[in-house]
Amino acid sequence: MAQPSQADSTSLPQAISSAKQFYLQKTQNQLHLYNGVEYITGTEGYVKGHPYFNSDVAEEGTISYDNIVYAQVPLQYDIFKDEVVVEHMDNGHKIKLHSQKIQHFSLGGHTFVRIQPNNTATSTIRPGFYDRLYAGHVTLYARRVKIAQQATRGVSKEYLQKNSYFIEKDNQFYPVKNKSSVLRVFNDQKKALQQYLRETHMKFKQDPEYAMAKLAEQYSQLVKPL
């Protein structure tokens, strides 16, 4: 049997020490992130679907929490409760983060930002997290929510997702839901946008999110300074 060389016996403790240092450094760097409260799913009695955006398992994402950016963090976004959940790197327990401390987070190719209107009584948009679909001269957001609905048969409930859309223009938020409402917000470029829709043969009803984002992008190009 071959005996381990002196180099091998020396490198192994060094590798273990390096791994410990890496773990401690990562734990220390993300310690502030795990200061929320225990997350309770509250899914008892639900037999269909789940309360999360995109997936019912945690995915690696990036989050800005208390103005500190953390990368490669196991995240879930509960869109039934509008809560962001992280898994503790030590014990795997789920922790609900303080929403007011979150600036934005990215998950599954989507970037969510927290919007807090100055006056919630008069604003057309509620405080919470919004999926930023396009950002330019104007910004298009989607509000992702799930509601609990009684199942067709039996007493159990199921989760159903609903989306609503908002355009931020000149520091004002405008709810939109179809082609007419989007063109109303972009009324100063309505004729040019109608021509753009004709030329591109865009089917608004087939994929409204894509169509809204393309109209917002085209509007930004039309009004940008020369």
Image (cartoon, grey):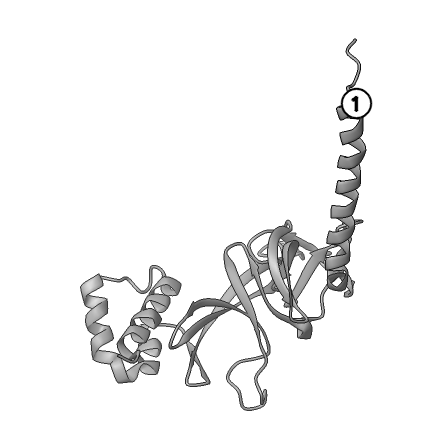
Q: Quadrant of the C terminus?
A: bottom left
Residue 115 visible, this orientation? yes
- Quarter-of-image position of residue 31: bottom right
Could you tell me the amino acid type at mark 1?
Gln
| Image mark count | 1
Please tell me whether residue 209 is drawn above or below residue 26 in the rendered image. Answer: below
State the residue position of label 1: 6
The one of 60 and 8 positioned closer to us in this rendering: 8
The reply to whether residue 38 is in sight is no
Q: Is residue 20 above or below residue 77?
A: above
User: Which corner quadrant holds the N terminus?
Assistant: top right
Quarter location, residue 187:
bottom left
Is 222 displayed left or right of 157 in the figure?
left
Q: Nearer the viewer, residue 73 or 14?
A: 14
Q: Is residue 205 above or below residue 168?
A: above
State the residue lying farthest toward the top: 1
For the residue pair 202 and 32, the one nearer the viewer reads as: 32
Categorize mark 1 by other alpha carbons within 10 Å: few (<14), some (14-19), many (20+): few
Residue at 59% from the left image edge and 80% from the top image edge: 116
x, y (%) of residue 77?
Answer: 62, 60
Give the vertical position of 25 relative to 34 (above or below): above
